[in-house]
Each structure stands twice: as C-alpha cells, then as structure tokens.
Image: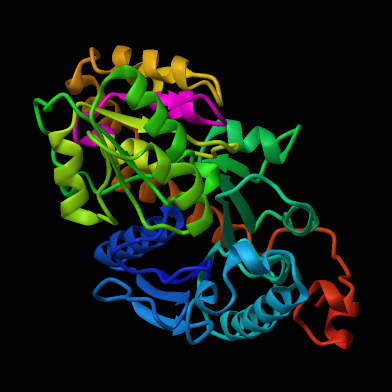
C-alpha cells in the first residue's frame, strides 16, 4: 500500500523522542516500511524518519521551538500557524495518490478531508477529547474513515455510544529495544516529560517516604515546575538523571526494581509504563485514565495527590514478579501486534471507499478546501 502517515508537529518525530506520540509515529513508520509498504511521513521538517520512509515536511521545524505550547496554547498565533500548516498538508495528501492515510495529527482539518474527498483514512485519537477535534471527528465519520483509540477507557471518553467505525488498537513497542533484566538493584525509576501533568514531584515525595532510591529521567519541558515543585525534593538518593532515551533508558530501566508512573491527567495509555514493564519492572502508579487497563496485575496503585499511598504502592510493586511484567507486554503490546491491527483497518477503509453514505457540506472555515468546493461537499 501507498500510505500517508500524518503526525503531530509539536515535536520532531525522531529519536530521542519527546513523548509517546513521537515514538508511536516513528515505530509505526518503521514497521510499515519493513512490511513492504511505501510510507510517506508528514511531519515537521526537523524530523528523521526511519530508513525507507519518505519525509514530507508540514512545517520547516516543530512548532514548540517557536511557539512553546505552555505559552501559546489556545492563542490565535499558534492556531493560525497550525491551520496554515495543515491546510497545505491536506492539499498535498489529497493530491498524493495515497491508498490510505493514517491521521495522528490532532488537527480538525484532516478528518474532514477524508469525508469530503472519500479518502480512506484511519484516525488515531491519542488524547482525551477536546471540543474542536470532537466536532471534526463526529461529522467526518464514514465507512472509509475509521477511528482508533489506544484503550477502552479512551474510547469511552470519546463516545458514549461507540460508533461502528471506532476500534481499540493498543500501542506497541519494539520488544528487542527493551530487553528483559531478571533482577533490579532495589531502586526505583521515573521517566517522562517533566511537566505538571506527569507528576514527577509526587514520584520524588513517594520515594522519599518509602526510603527507596529514585532517579528521574526526562526533558525539562516546564522549567518553573521543575525548579519550584521537583528540585526541592532532590538530594541524597533522589536525583535527576537527565534526558535518557533508547538503549540508555532501557539500561536504566533494567537496573531498577520498579517504575513510578504518576500521571495527573486522564492518561490515555502510558507508553513509558510498557517500556519499563518490558524490561521487567513492576509499576507503582497513580490510577488515572487507562493506567490499570494497561498495567493490570503488574502494578500497585494509589489515588492522585497522595504521596503516602504511592509510597505504599511502591513497596508493594517491588515485591511483584518481573517475569509477569515482561509477559504482559509480549502478549499485548508489541509493535507487531499494533501494526497488525492497523493494517486490517487500512484494508477495511480502502474496501469501503465507494460505500453509499450521505453527503455533507462543510462551512469554509471548517475545511481547508476552497469555499466553492466545501459548499458542495465534493
């Protein structure tokens, strides 16, 4: 198949990854190319796709460099920048002769072009719903436009009554990149972007209470949060280890005895959790969103904002079997299983391209098409 893989452009899609969406897009592209598909990645121009994947720049550089999300989120400046970028990307993808489009952008223009142009598409919803994208998804569903979420919890957040075009495809990782280690050294580890919604401060507090050494890994995305909420808890055997990725992060996971996973938002999945579990780590987790659905019996849980309860969960997690954590990831969350699911949906969307379905007329501001085209729903 000739596949357009459209990504979010907040960060570059390249190792070391800033977050789960970037890792998801890169490994998805690599596996699709390995299976013989012709893959074009629509991403920021400073991305670095895997070998055999063509890069189509949506913007010259990722937007967080010029318009940091924490400063520009919701502003006309950033919204106009994204609208201009994705208007061009939609025109290019519609004219590109692709068999199917995999949409990971979180932008409202992209799903609507599928409905308007009968362009086979799979849209993956990586975040909880927000108003503009929910409207775009609800009015663009069609037999040739299928939707995925990465967890049952996330699916229920998007729709009370699940439409027939919506499915769950769990995220997956390349198991060989996260080797199993049979024993840890008695310490804990935390990994993620250091920003308030990731809860690194709670991890540090809980480890201190539990008397367990902890190393925090991740890029400092929110400097004020790090300085005011995280740094005061550092010292002694609670330390910040910098931004590790890939083999370095896998080695750090393998050395530890448990992962502290502390989302303070409606976590859709938790990629860091399955990466650590693949290395053999049980998890002490804040139970938010899909956390229990993903981690299952390989974790111990605490409510949000309760460091003492999280400390108890950490001690419980460290007693859980490491082999069970690896086995859960092998059975449910490999990149191979993820792409098997997506490939099946690509075929389904392509087969439904000519299905009978009511037309729809979008207002010009809702779609990248010229007003005269948008008005006809052509």
- Residue 115 lies left or right of residue 7; in this view the side is right
The figure's colour scheme reads rainbow
- Residue 376 lies left or right of residue 160; in this view the side is right
**Picture residue at 67% right of the left edge, 69% below the top:** 72
**Picture residue at 17% right of the left edge, 43% below the top:** 252
Instruction: Say if the magenta span includes residue 292.
Output: yes
> Of residues 10 and 368, which is closer to you in this image?
10
- Which quadrant of the view contains residue 184? top left
State the image coordinates of residue 213 (x, y, percent, origin top left).
23, 29
> Of residues 65 and 353, which is closer to you in this image?
65
For the N terminus, which image quadrant? bottom left
Q: Is residue 97 shown above or below 249?
A: below
State the image coordinates of residue 198 (x, y, percent, origin top left).
49, 42
> Of residues 83 and 235, which is closer to you in this image?
235
Q: Is residue 321 shown above or below 341?
A: above
State the image coordinates of residue 181 (x, y, percent, origin top left).
10, 32
**Picture residue at 38% right of the left edge, 33% below the top:** 204
- Residue 58 lies left or right of residue 144; in this view the side is left
| Residue bounds of the magenta highlight | 277-295
**Picture residue at 78% right of the left edge, 52% below the top:** 138
- Residue 47 lies left or right of residue 198; in this view the side is left
Quick check: can you spot residue 298?
Answer: yes
Quick check: can you spot residue 270?
Answer: no
> Of residues 27 and 259, which is closer to you in this image?
259
Q: Is residue 339 shown above or below 162?
A: below
Q: Is residue 161 shown above or below 26?
A: above
Instruction: Say if the magenta span includes residue 60.
Output: no
């Amino acid at each position: 198949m000739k596949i357009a893989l459209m990504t979010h452009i907040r960060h570059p899609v390249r190792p070391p990854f800033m977050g789960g969406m970037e890792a998801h897009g890169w490994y998805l592209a690599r596996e699709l190319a390995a299976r013989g598909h012709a893959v074009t990645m629509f991403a920021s121009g400073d991305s670095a796709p895997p070998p055999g994947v063509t890069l189509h720049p949506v913007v010259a550089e990722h937007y967080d460099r010029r318009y940091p999300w924490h400063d520009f989120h919701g502003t006309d400046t950033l919204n106009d920048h994204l609208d201009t970028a994705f208007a061009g990307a939609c025109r290019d993808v519609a004219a590109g002769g692709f068999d199917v489009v995999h949409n990971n952008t979180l932008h409202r223009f992209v799903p609507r072009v599928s409905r308007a142009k009968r362009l086979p598409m799979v849209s993956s919803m990586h975040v909880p719903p927000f108003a503009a994208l929910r409207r775009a998804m609800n009015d663009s569903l069609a037999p040739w436009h299928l939707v995925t979420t990465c967890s049952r919890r996330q699916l229920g957040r998007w729709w009370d009554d699940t439409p027939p075009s919506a499915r769950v495809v769990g995220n997956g990782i390349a198991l060989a990149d996260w080797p199993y280690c049979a024993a840890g050294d008695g310490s804990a580890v935390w990994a993620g972007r250091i920003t308030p919604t990731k809860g690194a401060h709670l991890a540090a507090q809980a480890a201190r209470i539990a008397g367990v050494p902890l190393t925090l890994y991740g890029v400092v995305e929110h400097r004020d949060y790090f300085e005011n909420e995280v740094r005061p808890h550092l010292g002694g055997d609670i330390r910040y280890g910098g931004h590790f990725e890939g083999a370095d992060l896998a080695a750090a996971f393998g050395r530890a005895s448990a992962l502290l996973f502390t989302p303070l938002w409606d976590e859709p999945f938790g990629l860091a959790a399955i990466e650590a579990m693949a290395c053999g780590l049980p998890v002490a987790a804040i139970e938010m969103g899909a956390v229990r659905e993903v981690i299952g019996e390989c974790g111990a849980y605490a409510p949000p904002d309760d460091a003492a309860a999280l400390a108890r969960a950490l001690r419980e997690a460290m007693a859980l079997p490491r082999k069970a954590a690896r086995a859960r990831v092998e059975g449910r969350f490999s990149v191979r299983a993820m792409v098997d699911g997506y490939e099946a949906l690509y075929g389904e969307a392509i087969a439904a391209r000519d299905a009978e379905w009511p037309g729809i007329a979008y207002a010009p501001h809702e779609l990248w098409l010229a007003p005269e085209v948008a008005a006809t729903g052509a």
